[in-house]
Amino acid sequence: MSTITFVTGNPNKLKEVIQILSSSEDGAATSDSNKVGKFTITNKSIDLDEVQGTIEEVTIHKAKSAAEVIGGPVLVEDTCLGFRAYNDLPGPYIKWFLLSVGLDGLVKMLLGFEDKLANAICTFGYCEGPGKEVKIFQGRTEGNIVPSRGPTNFGWDSVFEPVGFEQTYAEMDKSVKNTISHRFRALDKVRDFLLSQ
């Protein structure tokens, strides 16, 4: 049994990742276990330098840096939220925008635009260890930016309403969200990769 360290200090994100990875392809939980194939998923919070660049460049840098610190297999994640009206900005800088202007500020950024469409993009990077190549797994979900609805304890979930739904991510039952989210779509590819190893 090999161990992969998922680099996060966010307990909500860790719980969601393990729930999705340990489920079957239709999103049904197969167990509450942190095992995927021959791998055990653990986590560790590490302060890593964040570089500027594309989401792929940011993710590759994070994965390589984390593998050096951990000295073994790591999984890192980077999440973007890009407003179509802003040519996909804030993109990988959404975390800093959210900290600076808050949920209400994100909504107000689009007040002058008819187009409220946004792309939620989740990119996972897997690195087998120091000096190894980083494998990238990406998932996207389109949605609209709406006034905050639902719990506000998980990033920008309460202002993102996926296309085809009348609820924000925050209002959705996790069993629904975890079958349509950008994170689910990326982790579905991660799970397939890990099970093939």
Image (cartoon, rainbow, N blue to C red):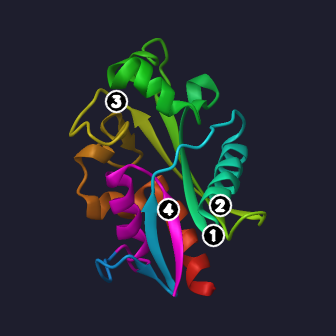
Question: Relative to 175, is 123 on the left or the right?
Answer: right
Q: Position of residue 35 (x, y in %)?
A: 42, 81
Residue type (three-letter) at the residue carrying disc 1: Gly
Question: What range is drawn magenta here?
Answer: 1-27
Residue type (three-letter) at the residue carrying disc 4: Phe
Select label 4 or label 2 by which is in front: 2
**Residue 72, which numbered label?**
1
How packed mark 2 is, by other alpha carbons closer than 10 Å (few <14, some 14-19, many 20 or more), is many
How packed mark 1 is, by other alpha carbons closer than 10 Å (few <14, some 14-19, many 20 or more), is some
Distance Cα–Cα, label 3 vs label 1: 41 Å
In the image, residue 58 lies in the stretch drawn in magenta: no
Upstream in sequence: badge 4 or badge 2: 4
Determine whether the residue tagged by mark 3 lies in a helix, strand or loop. Answer: loop
Q: Position of residue 99 (x, y in %)?
A: 41, 25
Q: Which residue is mark 2?
A: 67
**In the picture shown, does residue 157 fall above or below 141?**
above
Q: Residue at x 42, y 14 (%)?
A: 111
Q: Which residue is mark 4?
A: 6
Label pair 1/2, CB-CB below 8 angstroms: yes
Upstream in sequence: badge 2 or badge 3: 2
Q: Which residue is mark 3?
A: 146
> How many marks do you count on the picture?
4
Upstream in sequence: badge 4 or badge 3: 4
Distance Cα–Cα, label 1 vs label 2: 6 Å
